[in-house]
Amino acid sequence: MKVVILAGGFGTRISEESHLKPKPMIEIGDQPILWHIMKIYSHYGFNDFIICLGYKGYYIKQYFAQYFLQKSTITFDFRMANQQIIHDYHVEPWKVTLVDTGRDTMTGGRIKRIQPYVGNESFMLTYGDGVSNIDLDRLVAFHKNHGKLATITAVNPPGRFGVLNIDDDKKITNFIEKGKVEGSWINAGFMVLQPEIFEYIEGGDATIFESAPLEALARNEQLMAYRHCGFWQCMDTMRDKSLLENLWAGDAAPWKVW
């Protein structure tokens, strides 16, 4: 199953660093938060990634273009026309497709643009700024068992996020954008989606996935919630970054499941 990561936003709330690089490339420890997210998926055997690029996307391209060399012991022999000899390497078994989905494109438009790379199969989707100790095997099993088109992971952090109204059968009955209502369950990303969800994305690049598409899926009883009661944290502000940095530096990062 492919993993789609939204990594094209401007990161305006953490502009102290995002004015220099895209938010997914802001480092926790010595690696971008994007790497941490990919390591979580890779731990569960999901190694085929499609990354939606936008704002300063060339930073992400450069990172992966150089990744193999960064993880290798290598000899450069300039006497032999700059021959490169790889002695050993330690890289993850990743396949990474980097797609320029537009600098100003909204989340729905970015997802629509990567449809040709997903194909007619179920796929996973998450944001490029949130980490968790979620059990992805259980998430996928939950999605397959309920038979609906979409599953969102729901968590219980403080306010300032969009609210999910969830009934007793774990169906999401309403999807409300952030800033409108205070509530207990919010969208944490880590979604599993059927290819039919592309039919819900209309309006081109201006479509916000968290608005009309998810609202329509909820109305049609096709949107389910996987409740995660463990650790989840997004990196929305410098305060969030400091929290994640301290956890990582103290060898107490709950998302480090690998």
Image: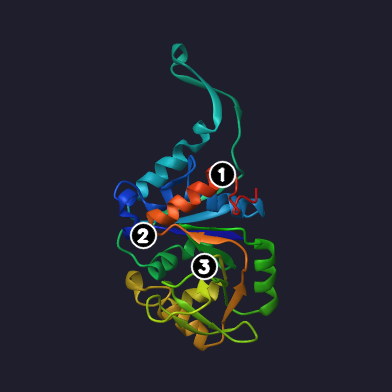
Asked whether, in this view, residue 141 is left or right of residue 88, the answer is right
- Residue located 33% across and 48% down the image: 17
| Residue wearing tag 2 | 9
**CA–CA distance between discs 1 and 2?**
29 Å
Specify the label residue 250 is tagged with: 1
Q: Earlier in the sequence, mark 1 or mark 2?
A: 2
Specify the label residue 162 is tagged with: none
Q: Secondary structure at mark 2?
A: loop
Question: What is the crowding at mark 1: few (fewer than 14 residues within 10 Å), some, or many (at least 20)?
Answer: few
- Residue located 44% across and 75% down the image: 162
Q: Earlier in the sequence, mark 3 or mark 2?
A: 2
Which one is in front in this view, the residue at disc 1 or the one at disc 2?
Answer: 1
Instruction: Decide which of 168, 209 is in the foreground and name it.
Output: 168
Specify the label residue 188 is tagged with: 3
Which one is in front in this view, the residue at disc 3 or the one at disc 2?
Answer: 3
Give above or below for 59 relative to 5: above
Residue 5: percent from the left, percent from the top?
48, 58
**CA–CA distance between discs 3 and 2?**
16 Å
- Residue located 38% across and 73% down the image: 208
Q: Secondary structure at mark 3?
A: loop
Question: What is the crowding at mark 3: few (fewer than 14 residues within 10 Å), some, or many (at least 20)?
Answer: many
Q: Earlier in the sequence, mark 1 or mark 3?
A: 3
Which amino acid type is shown beneath numbered disc 1? Gly
Residue 25: percent from the left, percent from the top?
42, 48
Which amino acid type is shown beneath numbered disc 3? Ala
Which one is in front in this view, the residue at disc 1 or the one at disc 3?
Answer: 1
Give above or below for 231 relative to 83: below
